[in-house]
Image (cartoon, rainbow, N blue to C red):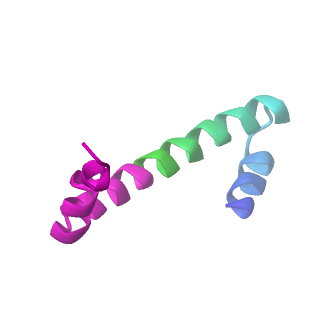
Amino acid sequence: MLSALFFFFIKYNEPIILKLIQNITFYFFFIFLFMIIIFFWVFSIPDLHNECINFPNFLPN
């Protein structure tokens, strides 16, 4: 990831701040996508899904 940032700094002659902001948003998009995939993967497991759905049931009525 740092090597990719360094590569972008060398390849393009744009201001460093602007390119850094673009790279941060670019990596943030992939991190967000990865978190969504992990979220749906966890909720696709039946035991964890049932635990998450039945989580408030231990509270007294």
Question: Quadrant of residue 37 in the image?
Answer: bottom left
Q: Position of residue 48 (x, y in %)?
A: 26, 66
Near-viewer residue (40 or 25): 40
What is the magenta segment's predominant secondary structure?
helix
Residue at the (65%, 34%) spot, across then down: 22
Q: Position of residue 4 (x, y in %)?
A: 68, 58
Considering every residue shown, the one lying at the far left of the view is 46
Near-viewer residue (51 or 45): 51
Q: Horizontally, is 13 left or right of 21 in the view? A: right
**36 magenta-colored:** yes
Question: Quadrant of residue 54 in the image?
Answer: bottom left
Near-viewer residue (9 or 61): 61
Q: Is residue 12 above or below residue 35?
A: above
Q: Horizontally, is 54 left or right of 29 in the view? A: left
Q: Position of residue 31 (x, y in %)?
A: 51, 51
Q: Is residue 17 above or below residue 60?
A: above
- Stretch in magenta: 34-61
Residue at the (60%, 36%) spot, across then down: 25
- Rendered-image quadrant of the C terminus: top left
